[in-house]
């Protein structure tokens, strides 16, 4: 498969079409590092926990938009990882740190900084977005970092003030990883 790179900006962002999938797949079933893992610090409300678990995590791959759900294997994502010769990916956003709404300007600036960080780290990355299950909630742009280590993903998410991020290993199954301390 041919992949175009955005060389004008010395970026390793993979060029992808701006398509939106029509609908989503089934319900999420599994969490990784459930917040109660951190004794005495379970400050995540059930409502927020459910929102993260049931969200649709969209990856704008070169040939299609992949809709991922926590705990559900994705053969398409597994193929995407194989295509780029990597075994891991992380879905990260800089939007709304600690699940608190901030201005559009602040969100866009933080997301642009995250994209620059991906380039500085020399990571291949795709664009994506996190969508609320009902489409009534927030829709946040994401960076889908390919070939990134879980520890590095966690440090980035923590630095962005995020409560959680999505991590995928070679199995093609997205897991929700809670960031500590939150």
Image: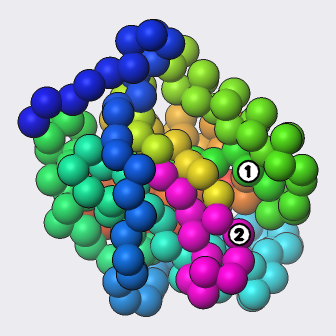
For label 2, the SS is loop
Residue 135 in the image: above or below residue 62: below
- Looking at the image, tell me whether mark 2 or mark 1 is earlier in sequence order: 1
The magenta span reads 128-139
**Residue 115, image x, y percentages:** 58, 30
**Residue 44, image x, y percentages:** 79, 75
For label 1, the SS is loop
Residue 39 in the image: above or below residue 26: above
Farthest-out residue, left: 1
Q: Residue at x 15, y 44 (%)?
A: 82
Q: Which mark is residue 138?
A: 2
**Residue 9, image x, y percentages:** 50, 12
Q: Residue at x 43, y 89 (%)?
A: 27
Quadrant of res 123: top left
Left or right: 17 as drawn, with respect to 104: left
Image quarter in which the N terminus is found: top left
* Residue 53 in view of the camera: no
Label 1, on which residue? Answer: 95
* Residue 129 in view of the camera: yes
Q: Are marks 2 and 1 in contact (CB under 8 Å)?
A: yes
Q: Residues within 10 Å of mark 1 (few under 14, many from 20)?
A: many
């Amino acid at each position: 498969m041919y992949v175009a790179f955005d060389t004008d900006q010395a970026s390793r962002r993979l060029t992808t079409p701006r398509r939106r999938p029509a609908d989503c797949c089934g319900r999420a079933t599994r969490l990784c590092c459930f917040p109660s893992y951190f004794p005495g610090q379970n400050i995540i409300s059930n409502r927020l926990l459910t929102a993260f678990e049931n969200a649709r995590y969209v990856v704008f791959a070169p040939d299609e938009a992949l809709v991922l759900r926590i705990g559900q294997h994705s053969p398409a994502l597994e193929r995407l990882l194989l295509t780029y010769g990597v075994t891991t990916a992380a879905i990260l956003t800089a939007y709304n740190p600690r699940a608190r709404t901030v201005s559009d300007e602040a969100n866009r600036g933080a997301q642009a900084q995250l994209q620059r960080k991906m380039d500085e780290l020399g990571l291949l990355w795709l664009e994506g977005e996190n969508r609320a299950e009902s489409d009534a909630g927030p829709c946040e742009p994401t960076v889908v970092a390919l070939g990134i280590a879980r520890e590095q993903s966690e440090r980035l998410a923590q630095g962005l003030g995020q409560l959680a991020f999505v991590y995928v290993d070679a199995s093609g199954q997205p897991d929700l990883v809670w960031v500590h301390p939150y």
